[in-house]
Every structure is written in C-alpha cells, then in structure tokens.
Amino acid sequence: MPRQNDKDNNRADGARKGRALRGREGRNNGGRGSGRGSTGTVRLWGRHAVEAALTNPNRTAKKLWGTREAIQEMLDDHEAELPRDLPVEYAQAVDLARLVARDAPHQGLVVECLPLEDVALDDILDEADGRTLVLLDQVTDPHNVGAILRSCAAFDVAALITQDRHAPPESGTLAKSASGALEVVPWVRVVNLARALESISEAGYWRIGLDGEGKAEFPHALPTGPVALVLGAEGEGMRHNVMQHCDAIARLPISGAIESLNVSNAAAIALYAAAVRDTAED
C-alpha cells in the first residue's frame, strides 16, 4: 500500500500521513482477514493489545494502521510518540476491518509485528521466585488462552506453559482476548508437557491438576509452597499421562446446577484462591 507524501504538518507525534485502504487494494494487499500478516509476522488489533505491543521492548513492530482519532487518542493518553522508523498508515475503520478477522473489534488500531521470541522453561524456573505457574493441556481456543493470559497477568503468574503442538498460535484474536497480557506474561511452549511437569517438580513446585472428578476440593488442596496449576481442555480434560504427573487432582466447589465451568473461568477462580492463600501466608 503506497503512501502519499505528507504535505502538511498535521501529524500525530511522529505518525506519518497516508491514504486509506480502499477498494481492491484494501481487499488484496495483505488484507487476509485472519490476523496473519505476511510470512513471519502477526497482526494484532484492539486498543490494549496494540498499545502493549508498541511499548513492549521485546516486540518488533513493522507497521501500524489506524484511524487518526484512535492513534491520536493513544498518544495523548500516554504522552508518548511513535517510533520515527515505524511506518504508519491512516485508514478508515471500515478499511481496517479488512486487515483483521471477521467482525473483530479492532477499535481503530492494527499493528503488524514479529512474533515474540521463544521462552525457555529453565529460564522461567530460574527467575520465577516461587510465583505460580499455569499449564494448559490441549486448550486450543484462542479466546480461552487469551483470557487465561489476562488472569495470569492479574495474579502475577510467572509463566503460561503449553505444548507447542496442541495450543493456538500467537494471533490477533488471542491478543485481543488477552487485553495486553500477551506482552506481559511469558508464554513457554514445550515439546512434552509431562516432562515439563517433571522439571517443575524438581524446581520445588507442587503440581495441582484441576478436574471435575478430583477427590480433593480446591482450594483446600493447595499445599504450602510454590504451586503449578494444570488445566485440561473442556470436555476431554487432562490427558492421562499429564494427570499422572500431578501431585494432586482437585475439583472446584461448584453447585450441581451446572456440570462444569469454562476453562478460562476455572483458571481465574483457581488463581484467585492461590493468591489469597499466598496473602494469608505472608
């Protein structure tokens, strides 16, 4: 999408003037509607997700699209400037919709950036200082993983850990659901979740799996000391081998009026209970 020359000084603190994405160009020139940019990049959208990506020193932004109002409001709120080397394309809201997933609430902002670099489990365990870990076993819905990342950020979780083959990729949908937490909470992808649980145990963590059929009741099952919470996919739950690598399997005390909770809701409740326990211990 070529940029017209900027002929006036009316710009948003370093953002350069461009023309909107219209017609065939808007549909075909990179507008895939999936949250994917060109090869090797990812598109993030929504106010919190874009702001967090632009302020994350570990994230490389390649291009920003936005309405004039949304970009100016973002800059005014943070009293900041956009990087001078960041290409900026002004566009109308209807044109931005062609760059994101169908009906995605982009809130006037879309950024294309490189994926975050991989994080090693050993590095997390070295730096976690006893903070809670969260492991997901085959939870593949990006909305759920994003919501869980948001809860992880709220309760100062050291890292989210998933298996690389059975988890959603980094995407705009996931980042929007995470509301900025994708840039804050380390996300570790491992080849084998059971082996990761062994390493976590060796690091001094108690591994507590959450399952509706668990004999113990959460949060009474929480021991003293660092905890790793393990949650499985809705319906199928944790795989047998993963469950065998937990020190205890616990259930949340919900009424019989409903069979189970959404996995992201269960994670939020469990993290709150763990945080309350930690506060009481202090």
Image: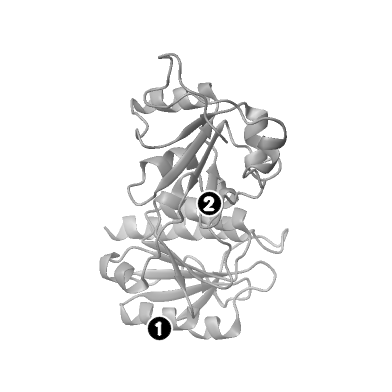
Quick check: 4 above or below 240? Answer: above
Pinpoint residue 17: horizontal percent, then vertical percent: 48, 23
Q: Give the residue drawn at x 48%, y 50%.
A: 150
Q: Give the residue drawn at x 60%, y 80%.
A: 239
Name the residue that disc number 1 marks: 198
Name the residue that disc number 2 marks: 42
User: In the rendered structure, are the residues bearing label 2 and label 1 in contact, judged by CB atoms less than 8 Å apart?
Assistant: no
Circle 1 crowding by C-alpha within 10 Å: few under 14, some 14–19, many from 20: some
Pinpoint residue 6: horizontal percent, then vertical percent: 45, 20
Pinpoint residue 121: horizontal percent, then vertical percent: 36, 72
Quick check: 181 above or below 87? Answer: below
Q: Is 49 placed left or right of 225 in the picture?
A: right
Q: Amino acid at mark 2?
A: Val
| Nearer-N-terminus badge (2/1) | 2
Q: Give the residue drawn at x 60%, y 66%.
A: 139
Q: Residue 52 is drawn in which quadrant? A: top left
Give whichever of 167, 217 is nearer the camera: 167
Secondary structure, mark 2, is strand
Residue 52's disc is: none
Pinpoint residue 25: horizontal percent, then vertical percent: 67, 36
Secondary structure, mark 1, is helix
Quick check: 266 above or below 36? Answer: below
